[in-house]
Image: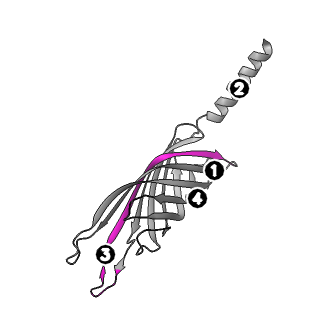
Amino acid sequence: MKFKIYLTGMFLSLSMHLLGQDPHRNDLSVGFGAALPAVSRYPLYDNKPDLTAAYGFRFTRLFQADVAFDTVFHPVGMIFGPYGYDTKDHLYLTQFGGRVVFPVRQRLTVGLGAGPAFFHYSTVENISIGQLSFNRWGYYVLGSAKLSLDHNGRFYVGSTPKFLGTNGRSIGRFFVLGGEFGVRF
């Protein structure tokens, strides 16, 4: 009987340690990188700059809910032809999902996550083609590595490579690679 109580106490203690709350529940980051088309169904896409802003909320020490917004600047850019013109286009990617976070060392964490993504593509109105705009739902998969800059883990640098995809004919799939700076509070 005492052994069962001891095992139950050890199990609860270990569970509370693994699921214990991280002192920093909120995670806010900004990043800059490149959006690289991967198996794009639209042949005009090229490697373009990407700006990312993300917010995460840690429910437990190991699970984080994420919301992120990416902007890809001019994914098509110039279209050449008899009347070449700049499309002045943007691709906006909004992601909602979750991530499992693994503390590897005292200052290093890695994570894996996934969820749905919303794609919005738009151009500035052009006399020859009008205004193009479309929306699609898709998905994203990510991995992350973050290194704390201070002893208590409030500020960090890291990288969160993502794969974003949709089955829509117009957008295709992208890898987003880059660095980020963040703060936990």
For the N terminus, the image quarter is top right
Q: Residue at x 26, y 70 (%)?
A: 124
- Indicate the position of residue 115 as horizontal and vertical percent values: 48, 48
Gap in Å between the C-alphas at discs 3 and 4?
33 Å
Which numbered disc flags the more N-terminal residue, 3 or 1?
3
Label 2 secondary element: helix
In-front residue for pair 161/23: 161
Which numbered disc flags the more N-terminal residue, 1 or 4?
1
How packed mark 4 is, by other alpha carbons closer than 10 Å (few <14, some 14-19, many 20 or more), is many
The answer to whether marks 3 and 4 mark residues whose Cβ atoms lie closer than 8 Å is no
The magenta segment is: 79-104
What's the mark number on residue 11?
Answer: 2
* Residue found farthest to the top: 1
Would residue 12 be counted in the magenta stretch?
Answer: no
Gap in Å between the C-alphas at discs 1 and 4?
9 Å
Gap in Å between the C-alphas at discs 3 and 1?
40 Å
Would residue 94 be counted in the magenta stretch?
Answer: yes
The residue under label 4 is 158
The residue under label 3 is 87
Which numbered disc flags the more N-terminal residue, 3 or 4?
3
Gap in Å between the C-alphas at discs 2 and 3?
60 Å
The residue under label 1 is 109
In the picture shown, does residue 28 fall above or below 92? above
Q: Is residue 162 visible?
A: yes
Image quarter of residue 171 = bottom left
